[in-house]
Amino acid sequence: MLRVRCLRGGSRGAEAAHYIGSRLRGVFTGWVQRTFQSTQAATASQNTCAANDKATSPVPKDCLVCSYNEWDPLEEVIVGRAENACVPPFSVEVKANTYEKYWGFYQKFGGQSFPKDHLKKAIAEIEEMCNILKGEGVIVKRPDPIDWSVKYKTPDFESTGMYAAMPRDILLVVGNEIIEAPMAWRARFFEYRAYRRLIKDYFNSGAKWTTAPKPTMADELYDQSYPIHSVEDRHKLAAQGKFVTTEFEPCFDAADFIRAGRDIFVQRSQVTNYMGIEWMRRHLAPDYRVHIISFKDPNPMHIDATFNIIGPGLVLSNPDRPCHQIELFKKAGWTVIQPPVPLIPDDHPLWMSSKWLSMNVLMLDEKRVMVDANETSIQKMFEKLGISTIKVNIRHANSLGGGFHCWTCDIRRRGTLQSYLD
């Protein structure tokens, strides 16, 4: 930086003028030289890019990633892992998303492994699920095993991890783009690491790869005094639009979004805030329309056990959590089906979810569905709809917080982008 003292009159003034002029000529000459060198470098870079045109060409036709909805024929899927799964620490956001009868479990085992015997059975169930998917002609990929018990610390918090069991929670595929969700639980801050090897492979095949803004998860993201005493309290808070997550910064779980071609539906929940929804809306516009829908749900977290779209104009709507905007779908000619009451026993542990995982099914195509082998009532419902059921037992895997839809993320479905709401 050029610094000049104030010089007064006479020869000193002339000297100053001469000094300033010489310095400016040097600065200008240097700027011209640097500009010329920069232009040469840019030209060389452009020539290199032209020579390596493949690196900047449009997405190749053989891109491995392409999925527009929940029901086109499934060709490739990521299935989660229960290995090394840990109970998340009992923080305010975990408390807001879990049932009171399990709070003692979190307080006792937070940061430790889920019960070993239960975990072993869950791992075996998911392995069998993978084998059945392969037998149906679906390519199955798995995330990397990671030690989730390792404690980590950021400038804003410290925690242990949880698992890589539910890829639906962290990954959203829209067309040929994979979107990494920022998440809202501190125990899930680094969950993306288990999927990075797969995502890099998909990126190298031509897929788009987007990471949503990562939240700091500082204390300001959570209502530290969020009142949770009863189900009635939660109903009132949800009706008032109050959740444990604030609007301090964008956050969302991918599982709060569900796709139907050009229309994507989302709920404001305990883990997805309006800033996160707005980020997604702007990011996907103008090719996709993001619609906010809501439900009579005392504890909204992930849409696919409340509102699960299983075909063009065909949706499962949870009778215990009616959709406030259901007329929108009926006016569009959609068929709205209320699934039967789940059959899962009361004494079976569901540490992170409700019994309505029975409707958290995975469509292999419009006429095939993967459904829990124990849920005979919903099997009969599908059969009446002309949909063949592929029965798999994942009862112990359910305890970790997900059904078939949660445990998977469809990477490629054979279909095209269409509108189903117009």
Image: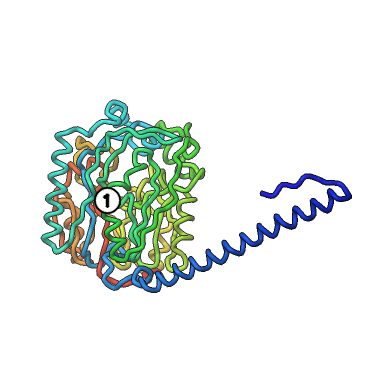
Image spot of residue 77 (x, y percent): 23, 58
Amino acid, disc 1: Cys
- 7 vs 133, left or right, is right
Task: Give the residue at the far right of this rendering.
Answer: 10
Please state which of residues 264 and 231 is positioned toward the viewer in this rendering.
Answer: 264
Say above or below: 168 vs 220.
below
Image spot of residue 384 (x, y percent): 19, 63
Please state which of residues 39 and 406 is positioned toward the viewer in this rendering.
Answer: 39
Q: Residues within 10 Å of mark 1 (few under 14, many from 20)?
A: many
- 420 vs 391, left or right, is right
Image spot of residue 180 (x, y percent): 36, 53
- 416 vs 82, left or right, is right
Colour treatment of the image: rainbow
Quadrant in the rendering for residue 105: top left
Say above or below: 341 vs 32.
above
Say above or below: 217 vs 265.
above
Please state which of residues 134 and 323 is positioned toward the viewer in this rendering.
Answer: 134
Q: Residue at x 34, y 56 (%)?
A: 172
Which residue carries the number 1 mark?
A: 406
Q: Residue at x 31, y 46 (%)?
A: 193
Quadrant in the rendering for residue 33: bottom right
Question: How many marks do you count on the picture?
Answer: 1
Q: Residue at x 48, y 31 (%)?
A: 225
